[in-house]
Amino acid sequence: MATTVSTAVLKTVPLFASCPEEQLRMLTTVVTRKSAPRSTTIMAGGDPTDSLYIILSGRLKVMMSDSEGKEVILAILGPGEIFGEMGLIDDEPRSATVISIEPCELLSISKRDFKKCLQENFDMTMAVMRGLVKRLREADRKIGSLALLDVYGRVARLLLDMAENVDGEKVVTKRLPKQDIAKMIGASREMVSRVMKDLQTGGYIEMRGSQIVLRDTIMLPE
């Protein structure tokens, strides 16, 4: 169910951070707020592109699958991130499917209103461009990892990329199922389980409940 949005909420979104108060008030008339339970398909690959989404809370996975049902997870998105913008720019259908991992709060804005905002706000346009460049760099890095690193290296790289600094330690704070790791690095779940066990036995990682603490020895060479 969609609800209206206040300027106070919009100010917390990085994409709208540079907008003047007058434009924020205008945005409240075109941006809607939606709730999505866990395992909700927000958009599906091949669908017509009609809107952009911004994550207020919760996490979602971006994924693709082939005709045989084999899936690959391209990214896991969290608060402050946007998705669905590519099709608004090139007018192509959705390139991937996005599904909520946990209950989410989202903002959405239609293609017409999004393009109008870009025309009227240079800083917002630059923010969208920076987001696209970041995604491109991440894709290049992932391609490099798949081509140059073995499964151990790919698991280590993924853990390092997803870790946050917590009290001086690198910690993967969000639950990360082995099946999802497998789909993100192009390996089997069994192989990922073996690698995670070896990393734990070797003292490279420590499991604390659903959290994964990374030791300095897991660092990959530049």
Image (tube, rainbow, N blue to C red):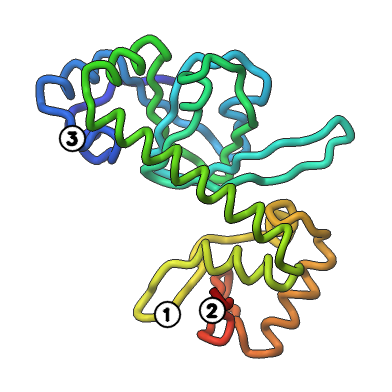
Mark 1, secondary structure of its residue: strand
Q: Which residue position is annotated with label 2?
A: 214
Mark 2: amino acid = Leu
Whichever of callouts 2 and 3 sits on the residue coming sooner in the sequence is 3
Work out which quarter of the rendered image holds the N terminus and state it: top left
Mark 2, other Cα within 10 Å: few <14 / some 14–19 / many ≥20:
many
Proximity of marks 2 and 3: CB atoms separated by less than 8 Å = no
Proximity of marks 3 and 1: CB atoms separated by less than 8 Å = no
Mark 2, secondary structure of its residue: strand
Q: x and y percent of residue 115 in the render?
A: 35, 15
Q: x and y percent of residue 220 in the render?
A: 58, 76
Proximity of marks 2 and 1: CB atoms separated by less than 8 Å = yes
Mark 1: amino acid = Glu
Q: Which residue position is annotated with label 1?
A: 169
| Residue at image point 46% right, 20% down | 89
Q: Is residue 220 left or right of residue 78?
A: right
Dividing the picture into quadrants, the one containing residue 43 is: top right
State the count of labels: 3
Whichever of callouts 2 and 1 sits on the residue coming sooner in the sequence is 1
Mark 3, secondary structure of its residue: loop
Q: Is residue 48 left or right of residue 57?
A: right
How far is the residue under mark 2 from the one under mark 1?
7 Å
Q: Which residue position is annotated with label 3?
A: 18
